[in-house]
Amino acid sequence: MNRKTLVLPAVVGLLAPVLAACGGSDGGSGGGDAIAVGTTDRFIASGKVPAPFDPAYAYDAGSWNVLRQTVQTLMAMPRSGSGDPVPEAAESCIFSDSGSERYACTLRKDLTFADGSAVTAADVKYSIDRVRAIHSSSASYGLLSTIDTIETQGDRKVIFHLNTPDATFPYKLATPTAGIVNPDDYDKKKLRDGFDVDGSGPYTMKAEVKGNTVVKTVFTKNPHYKGQLKPKNDKVELVSFDSADAMGKALEKGDIDMMTRTMSPEQINTYSTNPPENINLVEMPGMEIRYLGFNTVAPSVKSKAVRQAMAQVVDRGALASSVYGTSAEPLYSLVPAGITGHQNSFFNKYGDPDKAKAASTLSKANITTPVKLTLHYTTDHYGSGTKKEFEVLQKQLNASGLFDVDIKGDVWDTYRDAQLKGEYDVYGLGWFPDFPDADNFLAPFLDKDNFLASPYANSTIRGELIPAERREADRLTASKSLQQIQNTVADDVPVLPLWQGKQYVAARDDITGVEWALSSSSVLQLWELGRGVSG
């Protein structure tokens, strides 16, 4: 295969059931027992992460999936997860100028929070201004960085005046960071500690907590909800497990009805080839990526040559296949294949793994070998495959003779805090897109106030290329700037892309709507699930 033109499913959002479900595809009755969904996501409140579910702080796939059930946004992504955003709390939204700098929304009539109080334009302004003012350490506020001021007209009209053209702004209003909260429940100047969430979404939420950790999140259908979703159940329980194995055993025993993130590679293989009775596996394309990040001012990786040599040595194909089998593909850019503007910049620059070229790069920069490094990874956030992945990376780099690599794992609560403080020279992270556009695979890592708190700053990317691509409503036209950014990243290597993954959901065969449970943007859509008749 010509890796310059890697081919993945061309239609983002195309769903491929591995086994046909026995239940109906149009969802089941809204009544009946609660549908129990398993996850390995762990939600912990601590001094380091005080407010896991506050829209002003939350910025990971697990927390966002809780918020999407409960906190409404003006816009939302379509059911498939791809395409243009659609109105949700808003009745309509539109750019009201020709330069993508003035965005006007009108709220639905008689919109209320779950407690019955009215949702007004002032509440929308309060919510988004609050995120920008709190400026939390998660850097989620960066999604709203193109807002200059917010104007309200009456109770239903909100106008966003942007400080620069931003054709991606409707997508940003579809993220939980732009979620609408009640000023009575959320202080304007500080985060809401703990696990309480109040909003106007399709469900209300109650967290069952043990110690400082959520063990179960119960979602109950919100009778006051007004939006474009049509929930197919009355109640869903999101149950947290310590491991994929424990989650799988619960599914097989019937203690839960479905399991989602994160299934282990071994489970995916077993459920594909020899599934347990009454359990179906659904495979779907995804936009998840994994990568190494660098603290580019740290002595060990400050030289671009060290980072380039790592890019030259790592064998992404062997890494993906040996750890994740067919559920992952090698990735040669931060922008995954299937997204408009994608370019295999790392393969174009480095080609196949080549120890001799890497040695030459280090020699020309007068770097003494072997280069001592520690690669850091999280033990409990991305699934059981992460440790194996870093063991393979360690083996590949050390086998070159150019590196002397150790690996070290930490729990997410400790890990993310240390990474943001710059305590790791090299670290592994994953990215589930905020929205399905190439901008969202680039700007969060490279722009000012970025998600990584990275010291890497390229003035051309920040001052010219990101603003240029955001001016283009036609994303094909934006591709030229987007591809220039990707080429610069391949040369400077502030991050090193590794692989992109597919998504899997396993469920008992009386559960309907499973094929819609995860969108291509990794949005957990619990409202799609129903209970039908076992096959």
Image: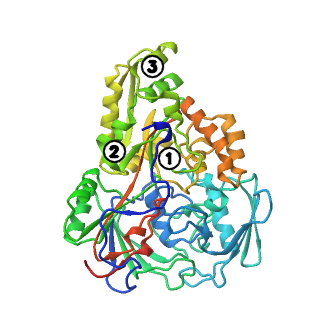
CA–CA distance in space, label 3 to label 2: 28 Å
Quadrant hosting residue 448 = top right
- Dot placed on the residue nearer the N-terminal end, 3 or 2: 3
> Disc 2 designates what residue?
386
Q: Position of residue 77 (x, y in %)?
A: 56, 66
Q: Report the colour scheme.
A: rainbow
Q: Are marks 1 and 3 in contact (CB under 8 Å)?
A: no
Left or right of 33: which side holds 486? right
Mark 1 or mark 2: which is in front? 1
Q: Position of residue 368 (x, y in %)?
A: 43, 14
Q: Is residue 153 above or below residue 380?
A: below
Quadrant hosting residue 507 = bottom left
> Disc 3 designates what residue?
357
CA–CA distance in space, label 1 to label 3: 26 Å
At numbered mark 1, what does the secondary structure look like: helix, strand or loop? Answer: loop
Q: Is residue 452 above or below residue 95?
A: above
Amino acid tagged 2:
Thr
Residue at 33 percent across and 48 percent down: it is 326
CA–CA distance in space, label 1 to label 2: 19 Å
At numbered mark 3, what does the secondary structure look like: helix, strand or loop? Answer: helix
At numbered mark 2, what does the secondary structure look like: helix, strand or loop? Answer: helix
Q: Are marks 3 and 2 in contact (CB under 8 Å)?
A: no
Amino acid tagged 3:
Lys
Residue at 56 percent across and 43 percent down: it is 445
> Disc 1 designates what residue?
336
Quadrant where the image shows the C terminus: bottom left
Camera-side residue of 460 and 70: 460
Camera-side residue of 28 and 263: 28
Does residue 89 appear in this view? yes
Quadrant where the image shows the N terminus: top left
Q: Position of residue 113 (x, y in %)?
A: 57, 79
